[in-house]
Image (cartoon, grey):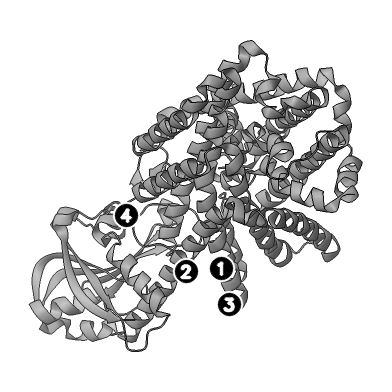
Amino acid sequence: MSDTQQKQKLPALVLGAIGVVYGDIGTSPLYALKETFAGHHPLPIVEANILGVLSVMFWTIMLLVSIKYVIVIMRADNRGEGGSLALVALVSEITEQKPRIKWAVTALGIFAAALFYGDSMITPAISVLSAVEGLNVVAPQFASYVLPITISVLTVLFLIQKRGTGVVGLAFGPIMIAWFLSLAIFGLLAIAQSPHVMWALNPLYAFQFLSVSPHTAFLTLGAVVLAVTGGEALYTDMGHFGKFPIRLTWFYFVLPALVLNYFGQGALLLGNPQAIENPFYLLAPAWALLPMVLLATAATVIASQAVISGAFSVANQSVQMGFLPRMEIRQTSNKAQGQIYVPFTNWTLYLAVVFLIFTFQNSSNLAAAYGIAVTGTMTIDTLLIGFIIVMAWRWPVIFTTPLIGTFLLVDLAYFSANAIKIPQGGWFPLGIALLSFVVLTTWRRGRSLLFAEIARRFVPIQVVLDSADTIHRIRGTAVFLTAPGEGTPAALLHNLKHNQVLHERNILLTVIVEDKPYVTQGNRLLVDDIGKNFYRVKIFYGFMETPDVPAALELCAKWQLPIDIMTTSFFISRAVIVSSPSPGMMKWRERLFLALSKNAMSAAEFFKIPTNRVIEMGTQIEI
C-alpha cells in the first residue's frame, strides 16, 4: 500500500489497527501485574518492589516493543508484509549464495512459526479466562460458573470461524477504543491518588530492583514478560494496515493507555496491598465492575480472534512454502484476500484450548505456561533482523553490535526466566512447538527427497517432441501438472504409454510459490511455446495467496492461448510413495512423511480444478 493510499484511508486503517493488532498486548493488564506479585514467585507488596517492577515493565515495553519492533524490525518489511516466515523469506534472499547461513535461517524461521502455534493455543485460554474471572470480584458466588462460561464463549468463537470475520470485524475497532479508553481513565484516577508512582518512569528504579536481589528479580522477569506478549503482532499484522497507522496508534494511543493502567494498578497497590486479589478490576468503581467484565470479555475474544486468524495465516504460508502438506483452505471474503478459514487448524486449536482450560483451571496457573513461546519467537526475530542489519542494510558495526547485543541480552534474560517455568506448564507450548517443528521439517525434507527422485527419472521433453508427429492426436487441450524443471511430466509419459495418444494442444503446467507475499496479475503467468503445439506455462503466487489454477489459466488468452476449462482435460500424477532400501531420512521420520502424504488434500481440490475435468495417473516413487 502506497503512502498516498495510506493517507487517504488513514482513519479506517487506524480504526482497523486498533481493533486487530493490539488485542493480545492490550489485554495483558488483566493478569501481568497480578502474576508478578501473586504468581508462582510472589513478591512482597512494598513500595520499593512496586516501583521497581513498574520501572522494569515500562522499560521492557519501550525496548522490546517500541524500539525493537515498531522502530527497527518494521523497517524490514517483505513487500509490505511482516511475520516470522515473511522475515525468513527476506533473509533467504540475501543469503542465497551462502547455503549454510540460509539453512540456519530457515530452521530458525520454521521454529519461530512452530512456537507461534503453541502461543496461539494459550492466548485464547488465558485471555478469556482472566476476563471471565472478574465475576469472582463482582460476586464470589459466581466462581463455579467461570469455567463453563469461558468454554461456552470460546466454543462460539471457534464455531463462527467458518463464516469469516468480516462482519464481526466491523465492531472490533470501536470495542477496542472503548477498552483502551477505560484502561487509561481508570489508571489515571488511581494515579491521582498516589502520583508518586510515576517516579517509576526513572530507569534507576529498574536498575535498583534488578541489582539488589538478582535471583528474585530474575524469577520476577517470568511474570513481567506477560506485559509484552502480543508485541510481535505489530510486525506480523503490518501488511494489513501499513507501518504508519500502526506506529501512530501505538505511540499516541495504545502505549499511553497501557502505561497509565499499569501505573494505576501500581498506585492502587501502594495504598491497598490487599487489592492484589485482582488489581485490574479493583481499579474500577463498584458500579463499573460488571460492565468492565463484559468489556474485558469482548476485548479478549477480539484478542483470541486475532491469534486464531494469525494461526490460519501461518498454516496457509506453511502450505504455500512447502512446510506442510496441502490442506483445505477456504476463502471467507470476496473482498479481503487475507480472510481465510483452515478447518484442521481451527479445530486443533479448539481442542488444545479446551484441554488447557480444564487442565490449568485458572489464569494464574496458565500464566506459568505462558511466555516461553513468546520470548522464543522474540529471540529468533532478533537473530533474523541481525542478519538483515548486517548483510542488507550494512549499518556501521559500531552501532549495530550494541543494538543487537542489547536486544539479544534482554530477550535471552526473559527466555531464561520463562524456561524455569517449564515444569509448571511451560512444557505445553514448548512441546507443541517441538512437535510442529518436527512435522514442518519432516515434510520439507520428504518433499526434497521426492523431487530429487523425480529429477533422477528425468526424461527430456525434446524426446517427446521429436516423436510427436508419429503419435495419433485427438481433439482438445490437455494440461499436465508438473513440478518445477524442464523434464516431461510423469502423467504425460503414462498417458503415452497406456493410451498412445496426444491431445491437439498440450500444456505443461507448473505452479511456483515465490519468496514474496503477493504476485501482481501482470506477473502471474509465463507462457513458453516449445513447438508442435506444446506449451510450458508457469503460474506464480506469493506465499500469502491461495492458488486458483482455472482463474490463472484464463489469463492465457492474452498470450493467444485461449483455454476453455470445461473442455480441457487435466492430467495429474498421483505419487504412491514407498520406502526405499536405503531411505533418505530416519525411519520414524519416513513413516511420518508417508502418513502426512496419504492425508494430504488432492492437487485437484487444492488448485480448485473441476473434479469432472481431472484424470489421475498413478506412479510409484521410492524415497
Numbered tag placed on residue 552 in the rendering = 4
* Residue 51 vs residue 363, the one in the foreground: 363
- Name the residue type under label 4: Ala
Query: What residue sits right under mark 1 in the picture?
Result: 107
Q: Quadrant of residue 35?
A: top right
Spatial CA span between label 1 and label 2:
8 Å
Q: Residue at x 56, y 58 (%)?
A: 430
Of callouts 1 and 4, the N-terminal one: 1
Spatial CA span between label 2 and label 3:
17 Å
Q: Is residue 391 left or right of residue 473?
A: right
Q: Residue at x 67, y 42 (%)?
A: 226
Q: Are the residues flagged by discs 1 and 2 in contact, CB closer than 8 Å? A: yes
Q: Residue at x 49, y 46 (%)?
A: 121
Question: x%, y% of residue 434?
Answer: 52, 63
Q: Secondary structure at mark 3?
A: helix
Q: Nearer the viewer, mark 4 or mark 3?
A: 3
Query: What residue sits right under mark 3 in the picture?
Result: 99
Query: What residue sits right under mark 2 in the picture?
Result: 441
Residue 568 visible within the image: no
* Residue 229 vs residue 332, the one in the foreground: 229
Q: Secondary structure at mark 2?
A: helix
Residue 276 visible within the image: yes
- Name the residue type under label 1: Ala
* 603 over 125 or under it: above or below: below
